[in-house]
Image (cartoon, rainbow, N blue to C red):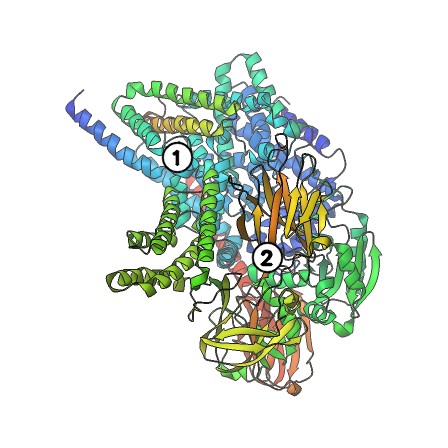
Amino acid sequence: MKSSKIILGILVFLISFYVFSLLEFEPLNQMMSTYFQSLVFSATLSVAILMPAFRLKLFYVAFLLLFIMGGFYLLQQLPWANAFSSLGVGILLIVSLTYLPELFKKGVVEKL
Amino acid sequence: MKKSLPAVFFLVISLFLILIWFRGGHLFAGGDVGFQALNPQRVLENARYTWWDATAPGSAIPQGLSAIPFQLSLSLLQNLGFPPVAVQATLFFVLLFVMGFGMYLFLIDKLKEESRLYPFLGGLFYMFNPYMMIQVWHRFIHTTIILAAVLPFFAIFWDKWIKKGSIKNLMLFLLTNLLAVYIYGTYAYIITVWIFLFFITITSLTPWEGRVKLLQVSGKFLFGFIIWILINCWWLVPVTQISPALLSVQHKSADSLINLIMISGQAILPYSLQLINPFYPFYQAEFGSVYKNTLLQLIPLIFVTVILIGLIRSFKSKTFSLFGIFFLLAAFLAKGGAPPFGALYIFGFKNSFALGVLRNPFEKTGLILVFFATVLFVLGIQKLKNRLIILVVLISVLVFSWPMLLGKTFGSVERKGDVEVPQSYKMANEWLKEQRTKGVLDGNILHLPLTRGESVRYNWEFGYNGLESSDQFFTSHPSISRGFNVQRTDDALTALSLVFRKSSEDSNKILKLLQNFNVRFLVLHRDLSWQGTDIDDPLEVEKVLNKLYFIEKKGNFGELVIFQVTDRFFGPKIEIQNSVSIVNPHQVNMGIWPWLGEVSNNFFVSPFQSQKIDSNIKSQVQEMLIFPQNAFVYPEASGSSLGELTEQLSSHLNNLASTVSYMKQLGLVEPITEKLAQNIILSSNKLVEAYNQQSFLAGYNDLINSILPEVNNPSIVYIERLKNDINDVLKIHELFLSLMQKRLNGAEQERVRQSQDKIREFLKKESLLPYFAVTDQATEVGQRQYYNLWVDWPGEYELVLTDAKTKDNYIEKFDKIDFQINGQQKALSGYFNGNLVSFGLIDLNQGLNEISILNPSPLNLVVPFENLTKFGDIKLSGDQIQMIPNQSSPAIIESPLEEIGGGDIYQVSFTGQIPTNVSVYLQIVQDSDPVEQGNKIPRISVQVFGNQSGSWQNYKLRLSSLSAVTQKASFRLAVVPINLQAFSSGSTLIKNLRVIRVFNNNIFLRSDIQSKEVNEPTQTVKFTKINPVAYEGTFDLRKPGFLFFKETYHSGWKLQLTDESKTFIADNHYLGLLYGNAWYIEGAGKYKFKIIFDPEKSFYYGMILSGIGLFGLLSYAVVIKKLKK
């Protein structure tokens, strides 16, 4: 990987970590540290931008988290279900938004 | 035929549902909307004007205009002879059909496939998903039902307008809007609809075709938006002119924020993704406990999986490429402040009052989520292909929606939603209408018992629970039947609500209130479910009514009894009066009203907000009544009472800690708030420690410096709920620092003074610091009552104490009370006059005056042991009461409380030896407490525990205030085993048990200005009501006086006077009778007058703008057509 990409990655990670931390409202997220969540989200954004080939895998990670959410939900473990769904949907949204340039350019995503 | 098959299919499904829902032949009503289909003509009559007077004393409801097309449609059915049930069934049938078929049309247009299966499945999913069942039909809010029905059509027409520039589709969109304009009665839906249309617009930009396309799309969006605004000006202009002032009175930003956070806690993603609001099916189990079954809970996860498959597919679909992202964004909108990224919402709410309309985001924006979820569901289903799996998914969706299919979606398991209004209501209404035809035009109908809230329950055979709807049942005259959520009006109505009771039985007071509220008829509802609510027992009210000399019983209609105020005693809607008292200030609480009736027969006039009454007018009134503009308690302290002060402090700190901990469980506490609470506790500990050890106050100053700015920091969520405790703690700090200063000197004294000054400054800003503090004096209650009174004209005023009947709770019975008036100690003797005690004339300065009262010595209200009501094993040994509960029975003692009143507060103290295996409950049992399975459930109840050592311990607790409607109460002490199974034995010893009333009586000042003999006899006003926003008439004014108009005060009410020479608008508009309107008219003479609600004009201005918009649109259409040719 080129050094410029690494620098860009670090920059994206740091800036997005700061922004994601600001966007969290801690009281309604009792099971997951907001810093941990922001860390995951900024890592997701960095990977999705710098290594687009991994985006499909990130989708799978998001679905896995939502699957775990379903399990906790059925076991009535709502705070955990909430934490996992929050991570899952957050990753889904971040990765989906990185497709926007392609969606606007071509109208579809040819290869996820 | 083949083409119309889907339509037929959706018609059949809708018809099937309607036949099931209405198989009992009953109307559905309740919730926030009451009876929508009962009498559409009546609603239409009200909706035509921006001022609604049907629910007296009236209010501005400009958004009601948007109901005109909807109610007009329903009233057409009514005119065709449809009974209410048929009107409602037809409405629901149409809406159900439009929902499913609309979604089908959108999907068939987009999918462009031969197979109609998937669009059809989409239509079905849109009709039968959990959101539609719970949030749309079960919630029963008609604006939401209609929005759900028209949203697909909005998408169809708007999409075609944006993509093709088809003016026909823009017109169709605007027409759909007009037909569904009722949805905007919920303001939030303006935002919802335009967010949705914005999403639909964005889809036209993919794939990117350059800036020109962007400009074209933006232009069409803006053109459509501007035309929409112009065409909707007929209701938008009145709403923007009138509503903001009303909304700012009804809602506070802090409350909206708290609501948002509470509701966001329910709208967390595990529920939002499933389109479920858990409150109704899970928390309240309104469809029964079946939804708690894991198998049933699994079903929504099946369609969520299908939606997620659809989400991935959407990226590869040319038509729906952005729908996956829109679905996720809609989920973010619907979940509110829940994670992730919830802070955006919180930030918006903290900084914009207008966003408060979205305080229930799942309800207000959830339909956008449902729309996109439906599209993704169809994409997901397409991927499944296997018909069997599709069938399983479809069946599971229908199974989850079983209440819809079985007609059980309305109401709840305990309270069915189907209602049948008894025939007696119709008969009573007919009788009242007959009176109108006989010429009884003026007057309101007062419905008793009067609720101060907005909803009621009737115990009819098919009972009702929801918005109080007497204005729908009784159409001859306006009905005073419920509160308005506007404090000033509700306070005034509270007096009417509480006056019909034995304890306050005073026929003159009742008459005065009836006249002040223009009451002509009284309808007693014996069928009201009153127990456990804040309204009186109808049978007790009836006993009072039967004794009143100024009303006549006119008849019984089933459970309704109608009384009429005799002509001689009736108070007309518009009156000229010279017997006037100025009441100041106007922003009083409900505590004032009963005393106004007690103290004076005059009419009341108050300056509104910052308005001043000039001395010219002062000379025309008879008396001045001044109520405290601020009342507060301040802790007492003396060298010997420091221990007590420390106990008070720890009690407030415990409250603070437990409130924070409770709020944290609800997800309502931000770290910054928690830190603030911790700092307050830490600073208190430091203070007490420093005081006790006479040591240096290290670190305290820094803590106080960090605490005080945060207490009023608007960014701290939920601080309002903590503020009372924080203020109480700071008051005690101030006292401690004051005592510390006396024994310190030099730099340490200076340091203490700095902290004290900061706290004093803070308390002063909060109006909680006495100007003339009393030091070195402490009573059993440990606090002193302070009152701030603003006096415009210096002089002598009579000092009056309210609630004289509470005198029996005190040793000296108010014969003599120690006052401090502007710093001067005065022991004044009281003279009893009804329920008031006068303490003679006192001299007061112009400006703010402070009066405080030394707590009168209280009597112990606990009756002797032999007179106590006892339950269980209870013995007296010496001065100790021994209470021994067992596994089958608690040990309870109960003592009646005499001469009580709503709002009374009691303090309980005792010395106890309480084992650790029991807890002691201190309760006040009120006659207004709810009853469950034959037992009263006390609303005032505090639990205390023993200590491990089993030693004697002192307890002192102040209980919450009694409910406003309470007339009988008793004190109860119950010893209850903590763990029944593990409990073997345990004896609790109690001694020195004392229950005292905490002195909290109000005071006011009275000053006679004119002799009462100079009154002119009442002058008659002849008037006609043209419509709810215009009255006209004549009067002959013999001397300067006040014209009273008994409709809720609004600055938009204008009095136009015409004398012999000119026509002019009266400019001295005051608050009359503390809720209505009053104008001062200076010149004597004969006048013609008009009273008009000026903001009504905005409707006509709006109509003109709508006309311009329509003309512009049509012109544009013609030009485009010609250009094309």
Whole-angstrom CA distance, mark 1 to mark 2, is 63 Å
In this view, the residue in front, B1067 or B71, is B1067
> Between residues B385 and B895, which one lies in front from this camera angle?
B895
Residue closest to the eye, B35 or B200: B35
Q: Position of residue B732 (x, y in %)?
A: 42, 58
Q: What is the number of callouts on the image?
A: 2
x then y, percent, for residue B566: 78, 70
Tell me where residue B573 sits by quadrant.
bottom right
**Quarter that holds the N terminus of chain B:** top right
Q: In what element is the residue under mark 1? A: helix
Residue kind at label 1, given as amino acid type: Ile
**Where does label 1 land, which residue?**
B202
Which of the 4 image quarters holds residue B995? bottom right
Q: Where does the image place residue B194, in percent across and percent down from the top left?
A: 45, 42
Same chain check for tags 1 and 2: yes
Name above or below for residue B843 compared with residue B56.
below
Q: Is residue B99 above or below residue B448?
A: above
Q: Chain of mark 2?
A: B
Q: Is residue B210 above or below residue B466?
A: above
Question: Farthest left residue?
Answer: A3
At horizontal 25% and vertical 24% (from top left) the residue drawn is A50
Q: Is residue B916 left or right of residue B22?
A: left
Residue at the extreme front: B878
How many neighbours does mark 2 have within 10 angstroms: few (below 14), some (14-19), or many (20 or more)? many
Q: Is residue B198 above or below residue B406?
A: below
Q: Which residue is disc 2 drawn over?
A: B906
Q: Earlier in the sequence, mark 1 or mark 2?
A: 1
